[in-house]
Amino acid sequence: SQQGEEDPQALSIQEGENATMNCSYKTSINNLQWYRQNSGRGLVHLILIRSNEREKHSGRLRVTLDTSKKSSSLLITASRAADTASYFCATWDNYGQNFVFGPGTRLSVLP
Amino acid sequence: GAGVSQSPRYKVAKRGQDVALRCDPISGHVSLFWYQQALGQGPEFLTYFQNEAQLDKSGLPSDRFFAERPEGSVSTLKIQRTQQEDSAVYLCASSSDTGTGYNEQFFGPGTRLTVL
């Protein structure tokens, strides 16, 4: 079973708009990571946020983490057609030795 | 440098056949993960190696699935007596992480397995 749950499942926006995706998880974590997957490049790591951090930025990406609500959000600003992909959150299970991925958000950025 | 490579990229098997999927991680990476990804879903964890030690195999769906990494580098995922429900993309990832989960994973392109 998957710990993370992303919403929305699918998101369609116009180029230049911002895209926000959310992820919820169930157990204690030490960090949360976001990955992107498209047919051209496979799964690629985007950003990692540790459990003691609340917000992190990387270029056009902004990630927030609320451990009290067990949730995270990924904001992509000024979206581009090349941002079209599926986005997954992944958590490292503190009790196990494995990463747990959510089902993903499919983002379509229309030119 | 070279990334994670997987072979074959595509595999078609008849139900009941055995298959072997290979993963070449990034040189020097301690950790290696196998995932199964069904269409439209996120990757599902199968098993984790730290060097040659298989530390977690809790995600392997049945005893038909077996993974090894005998010398701590290349890994093979073997599926015996394949079933149609085994059809999926099998992803391999490696990391310099040593069991904390703090380092990013580098993924291979995957092997798409189709069982007829």
Image (cartoon, rainbow, N blue to C red):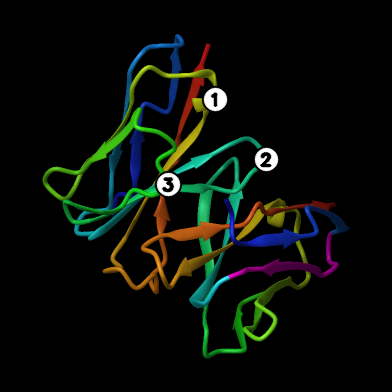
Residue B104 included in the magenta stretch of the image = no
The picture places residue B53, in percent across and down from the top left corner, at 18, 53
- Which chain letter goes with mark 2? B
In the image, what residue type sits under mark 3?
Answer: Gly
**Can you tell which quarter of the image residue B11 is in?**
top left
Disc 1/disc 3 C-alpha distance (Å): 15 Å
Q: Which residue is mark 1?
A: B85
How far apart are labels 2 and 1 at the CA level? 15 Å
The residue that appears at 42% across and 46% down in the rendered structure is: B59
Pointer 3 chain: B
Real-space CA distance between mark 2 and mark 3, rounded to the nearest whole angstrom: 19 Å
Q: Which mark is residue A101?
A: none
Which portion, as a residue range, is magenta? A15-26
Residue A99 in view in this figure: yes
**Callout 2: helix, strand or loop?**
loop
Q: Residue B55's quadrant in the figure?
A: bottom left
Callout in the foreground (2, 1): 1
Give A59 or A68, whichever is nearer the viewer: A68
In the picture of the structure, the residue carrying the numbered disc 3 is: B59
| Residue occupying the point 78% across, 53% down | A9
Upstream in sequence: badge 2 or badge 1: 2
Q: Is residue A97 above or below residue B77?
A: below
* Mark 3: few/some/many CA within 10 Å (<14, 14-19, 20+): some
- Write down the quadrant of residue A58 in the picture: bottom right
Residue at the limit of the structure toward the right, as seen here:
A14
Task: Please give the residue where the numbered disc 2 appears in the rendered image.
Answer: B40
Write down the chain letter for disc 1: B
The amino acid sitting under disc 1 is: Glu
Work out whether A24 lies above or below A63: above
